[in-house]
Image: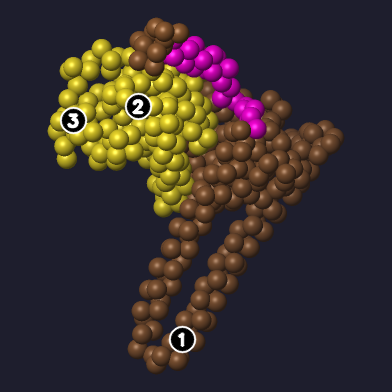
Amino acid sequence: MNRRGLVDILSGLVKTCLLLVILEIFTTAFLPAIGILSFRPEFNVLIVLFLAFKLETPFLAWLILAVQYAHSIFSIEGWAIGAFAGVLISLSVRYLKDMLDFSTAISTIVVVQVFQIAWFVITSFLLSLKLGDFGNFVHLFWQDIPESLALSLLAPFFFVLLDRVWKVNAKEAGVAI
Amino acid sequence: MKNFTVNSSKWKLVNNLLVIFLALWGIAKQNYSLKEVSAFESFLIEAFAPIQRGTLSMQEKAAGMLEHYVMVVNTSKDNEQLRHKVDELENKIFEFQEVKKENERLKQLLQFGKEIPREKVLAQIVSWDASNEFKVLRINKGSSDGLKKMSPVITMNGLVGYVYRLTPHYSDILTILDQNNRVDSIVARTRSHGIVEGVSEFKCRLKYVNRTEAVKVDDEVITAGLGGIYPKGIKVGKITKIDKENFGITQSIVVTPSVNFHKLEEVVVLIEKDGAKNSIDNLIEKRDLAKEEKNE
């Protein structure tokens, strides 16, 4: 998987960021316009998880940073908390790689959900630390769970799309729908 | 350089460490109360916000067309020429009605707070923040329209928030629903002082109100005018729940904002004129004195 050159990486990154921008516009403008204000799926998390699961490049940390920077245009959350969580998760994925299975849609959904929970624990902790108020930690964590379930269900389809963007071959991808 | 190839795990480690330190620096620098925008960020916001705005207006047009289509179906028995004319007229009436409704809304909005000697800039909502943790709105007015950071944002129903991030044509508003926005407030009836903080699900919490204060459900909460952001006397919301624990010196009060954030379309940004702050305070003091004299 290390066959990717810098040009491939940059082209994949640009396409991924464009996809993220479209999804962020859908979340920030379209959903509120039709009256859905309390449901905002964080597609940046799904994209970062894909990068962590499927790409093995020394530039992975910078790719995560770039995706989070694109996300920060649409959220005051900024890039830093997500970049930190993303790199930590990519490091843990490296050690757990043999245990992760993307051969079926169900296993993909489960793996994505588990890592989303890890993501929310890290970000909620950092946010609580930053705000100096751990009273909201549980609330911050729980409020993302409904959206994360929807994102996990979407993950098998979404990963197929990103497999094509990043030219991950079927053997590497292993996601079956 | 020989060992430092693209495949090198050292290279990976260095990159990971660099990004982790960069992220930690970013987290430390991040300010959730006020945000300076870099030129590049400003460029990106300016580039994508029109698309967000377009998405919103496309939805409005689609809803209008659907409504119009339903009307057209009902007149299908008429002859072709008449139907065409009716369509045209209905379309015009529909447009006029929409313009009339918008005019009424804007008129009410601009007339609201006439006594506040601040310049008022009318703005439309473009989008909401992408993260669930933050309750932030993007509006279609920016520094080129005279907006300044920390300018209060209101509607005729009450307080919305303040300008958090500013680009030439767009601004982000940190609403009172956000946990990073703290509004110095008083309960209008008892004059009990507290801080309103966003919690979740379109509710706020009034903190630091002494448990001996006789506040009641349905009491109105207004801005206290302290803190230098919001003028005094703007409606924040109503008390909807009070929990008095057996311990502690304060009470847990839930406030429902007077602004219906689900139906928010336009807002007014109050821009302070030079020397206006003093005149607002004078005005409020005079009003309070008059009220006290009346009560006596």
Q: Which quadrant would residue B119 be assigned to in this image?
A: top right
- The reply to whether the magenta stretch includes residue B129 is no
> Residue at left 56%, top 49%?
B50
Residue at label 1?
A: B84
- The disc labelled 3 sits on which kind of residue? Lys
> Residue at left 53%, top 23%?
B207
- The disc labelled 2 sits on which kind of residue? Arg
Mark toward the viewer: 3 or 1:
3
Question: As drawn, which residue projects farthest toward the front?
Answer: B2
- Residue A38, how many percent across, how many down? 40, 40
Residues in magenta? B14-39
Closest to the observer, B225 or B22: B22
Can you tell which mark lies on residue A4?
2
Closest to the observer, B219 or B108: B108
How would you classify the magenta stretch by its main secondary structure?
A: helix
**Callout 1: helix, strand or loop?**
helix
Residue at label 3?
A: A171
Which chain gets the brown colouring?
A: B
